[in-house]
Amino acid sequence: MNSSLVRVPGTGELSLGPPGTPEPPDATTALPAAWTGLGLSTNDGVTMKRAVEKTGTEHWQQLTPARYIYTKQELTVASVFQETKGIVLSAYFGGLVFAETAAGSKKYRAEISSVPKGDERALCVDWVDYVSATQVYHHRLYVPRAEVSETQDAQWSRTQEARWGLTFAALAPIGGSTALAVWLTDDPAVLLAAPGGGALAATTTPDRGDAL
């Protein structure tokens, strides 16, 4: 056990880019102008889910499967956003775009289509753990192809801010790639061994029988 390897995503943001937006170079470089942040989200932050479904083979001579056949894989990223702005509404309503009704009118209009259509985006989730002044670790999840797979009910009331719950699902890679997503970080805790082949620094933990 090593308590120094516990990570707390203290802050972060989810950003969207046009389809085909290239992978960022690392976890610390600021995202270029092609990316737009979705802004504030509720205290639950971001929920990432990876689900793999498989079915075991069935046999006459035995009850135990000899092999498993993979039938489905899904990677999703979900969050509830608190800023009512163009990029959030566009994602929630499948590509909705507001336009000024007349030049200089400062009045805006958008149509919610009766015909759903695909709205593919590139997606980045950034989070940072400020362990100490000398230990600041950045994590960035890049999904080259993603689309909103689910929206939560949006309630408008005087008792809380408008909220926009979105779940993004990764789409299959194209061009021969097998990368559904890419995780970038400057955090050495993710390594199986420390750089150079040594062991990651450990924090002494008493045995269960020792007095604390």
Image (cartoon, rainbow, N blue to C red):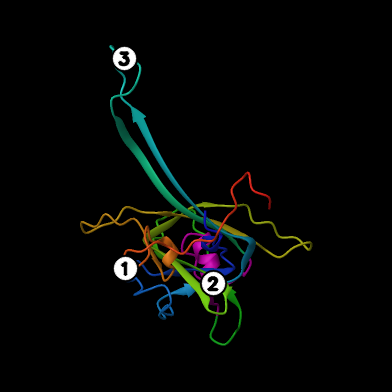
Residue span colored magenta: 82-101
Rendered view: 205 above or below 137: above
CA neighbours of label 3 inside 10 A, class few (<14), some (14 to 19), many (20+):
few
Q: Which of marks 1 and 2 is nearer the N terminus?
A: 2
**Place of residue 210 in the rendered image (x, y in percent of width and height, measured from the top left):** 64, 48
Q: Distance between the residues labelled 1 and 2?
A: 47 Å
Secondary structure of the residue carrying numbered label 1: loop
Find disc 2 in the rendering and name its residue: 86
At 68% from the left and 64% from the top, the residue drawn is 162
**Which image quadrant for residue 118?**
bottom left
**Which image quadrant for residue 133?**
bottom right
- Kindly report which numbered mark, 3 or 1, lies closer to the viewer in this rendering: 1
Rendered view: 30 above or below 10: below
Magenta residue check for 48: no
**Place of residue 44 in the rendered image (x, y in percent of width and height, measured from the top left):** 62, 58
Which disc, if any, is residue 62?
3
Look at the numbered discs 1 and 2 and tell me whether their residues touch, using CB distance below 8 Å. Answer: no
Residue that extends furthest to the left in the rendered view of this protein: 176
CA neighbours of label 1 inside 10 A, class few (<14), some (14 to 19), many (20+):
few
Give the residue type that dot 3 points to. Gln
